[in-house]
Image: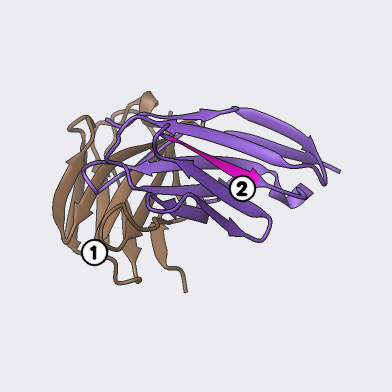
Amino acid sequence: GENVEQHPSTLSVQEGDSAVIKCTYSDSASNYFPWYKQELGKRPQLIIDIRSNVGEKKDQRIAVTLNKTAKHFSLHITETQPEDSAVYFCAASANSGYALNFGKGTSLLVTP
Amino acid sequence: DTAVSQTPKYLVTQMGNDKSIKCEQNLGHDTMYWYKQDSKKFLKIMFSYNNKELIINETVPNRFSPKSPDKAHLNLHINSLELGDSAVYFCASSQGGSNSPLHFGNGTRLTVT
């Protein structure tokens, strides 16, 4: 199936700094790329998504960029806050159209 | 109102038992999923259903049998539980397949002893 690689697996930043998480995918048919945030003991929740016809999308402190040619996309969080601490997952739509394939997650820790 | 609800939240059982997890969504979505999250937090697709039809069965042992009585429900029955089945199982739903956001339930933490 579709392979989604995510880096880094852990990321520690100081409050106010920026955090960047990168993902690559293998299936050129993928056209939908969401990002999910999962706090400890809770369900994954969508924070931002991007479709293949868009190169960049921003929502307040978070932004996602997509390079379809290179098959990679990235999540950028600016002015990080302690409540941003969580596990973040990237995902890419499978060519079946009926599954999202997830990266292995990035554990982000924002220290005050 | 919980959009995707699954029960039970916790399930502790012994090896060899059979157990079920139920999932219901009130979002009017046509696609439902089961994902397994292991101890390393990896989220792996198990099954997806569209309008009650099985679309994806991702190399899951046949001890796992999903059932979708209607498009708002997708239940998961597991026979002959093994230690390796211990994980958090998430139900999710979306509209029109995986090119739209998945909404996850709160998860069922299964512990097999």
Residue A47 relative to residue A99: left or right: right
- Percent position of residue B70, x then y: 18, 65
Q: Which is nearer the eye, A71 or A102?
A: A71
Label 2 belongs to which residue? Answer: A39
User: How many C-alpha atoms fall within 10 Å of the one at disc 1: few (<14), some, or many (≥20)?
Assistant: some
Q: Quadrant of the C terminus of chain A?
A: top right
* Residue A40 can be seen, yes or no: no
The dot on residue A101 is none
Q: Quadrant of residue A12?
A: top right
Q: Colour of chain A?
A: purple
Q: Position of residue B25 (x, y in %)?
A: 34, 66
Magenta stretch secondary structure, dominant:
strand
> Residue B78 falls in which quadrant of the image?
top left
- Within 10 angstroms of label 2, few (less than 14), some, or many (20 or more) residues? some
Q: Which three-letter amino acid code belongs to the residue tagged 2?
A: Glu
| Residue B33 position within the rendered picture, expressed as x and y whole percent measured from the top left | 30, 50
Q: Identify the residue position indicated by label 1 in the image.
A: B30
> Relative to residue B25, is residue A47 depicted above or below?
above
Does residue A74 show up magenta in the picture? yes
Residue at x 35% of width, y 71% of height? B27
Q: Mark 1, chain letter?
A: B
Q: Colour of chain B?
A: brown
Q: Position of residue A84 (x, y in %)?
A: 70, 49
Q: Is residue B2 left or right of residue A75?
A: left
Please provide the residue range marked out in magenta. A72-76
Question: Label 1 sits on what residue type?
Answer: Asp
